[in-house]
């Protein structure tokens, strides 16, 4: 079967149609075009690598200069000046190693509620939990109510010594002020029973 040949558009030479692309590239492209692309790719990669190597060398020199400065007498003098200055004051924060609750101020609305239900002479403490959505609520009963005593032996016999009467409840953050109100009312009811119905 004869191969169909067609004339080349550039030179007019008959070339097999299946080989025309190859003929045009090899015979009629500008000299070295096909090899130029092959040569520039490696050259550009080499240029990039040489640039990176030069930058790394420059960084190495700068690092060495810094190291040399650190060991120079001038550096020691400058460092000695900064060392002779008084140290900046430091802030120390005491942490609780037992992970106990942190003492917070008593919110105004809680203090007001305690004053209304129990009285202004009742002390309170609110301790927020570190990890849980709750707080400890302490009501400290005044000594004048005399509800908690410890008996001690003394030279004149047994003596009653007042002890801090602390009524504590853990209240969830969801209960909040309502939990505080409920606890204050329970403390009041209990004190009314022990005081014979009169709180003040």
Image (cartoon, helix red, strand yellow):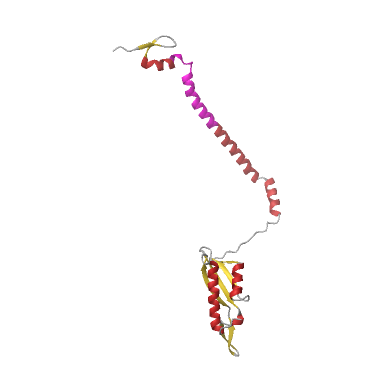
Residue nearer the viewer, 173 or 28: 173
Dominant secondary structure (helix, strand or loop) of the stretch shown in magenta? helix
Residue nearer the viewer, 3 or 93: 3
Would residue 28 be counted in the magenta stretch?
A: yes
Q: Residue 192, how many percent across, how many down?
A: 55, 81
Residue found 51% across the figure and 70% down from its top:
170
**Quarter of the image with the C terminus in it:** bottom right
Q: Residue 168, how many percent across, how many down?
A: 54, 73
Instruction: Determine whether 160 is above or below 91 in the image.
Output: below
Q: Quadrant of residue 124?
A: bottom right
Instruction: Determine whether 114 is above or below 145 in the image.
Output: above
Q: Residue 39, how many percent across, how many down?
A: 49, 23
User: Magenta segment range?
Assistant: 26-50
Instruction: Determine whether 172 is above or below 86 in the image.
Output: below
Residue found 46% across the figure and 20% down from its top:
34
Using the rendered image of the protein, determine whether residue 20 is visible from the camera's viewpoint: yes
Q: Residue 141, how many percent across, how many down?
A: 58, 77
């Amino acid at each position: 079967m004869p191969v169909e040949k067609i004339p080349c558009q550039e030179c007019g030479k008959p070339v097999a149609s299946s080989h025309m692309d190859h003929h045009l590239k090899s015979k009629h492209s500008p000299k070295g075009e096909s090899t130029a692309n092959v040569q520039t790719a490696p050259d550009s990669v080499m240029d990039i690598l040489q640039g990176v190597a030069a930058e790394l060398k420059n960084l190495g020199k700068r690092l060495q200069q810094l190291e040399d400065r650190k060991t120079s007498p001038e550096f020691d003098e400058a460092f000695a000046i900064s060392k002779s200055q008084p140290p900046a004051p430091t802030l120390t924060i005491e942490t609780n190693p037992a992970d106990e609750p942190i003492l917070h101020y008593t919110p105004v609305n809680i203090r007001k509620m305690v004053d209304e239900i129990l009285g202004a002479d009742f002390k309170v403490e609110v301790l927020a939990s570190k990890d849980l959505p709750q707080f400890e609520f302490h009501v400290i009963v005044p000594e004048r109510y005399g509800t908690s005593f410890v008996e001690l032996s003394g030279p004149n016999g047994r003596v009653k010594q007042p002890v801090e009467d602390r009524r504590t409840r853990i209240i969830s953050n969801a209960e909040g002020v309502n939990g505080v109100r409920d606890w204050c009312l329970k403390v009041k009811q209990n004190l009314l029973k022990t005081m014979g119905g009169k709180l003040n």
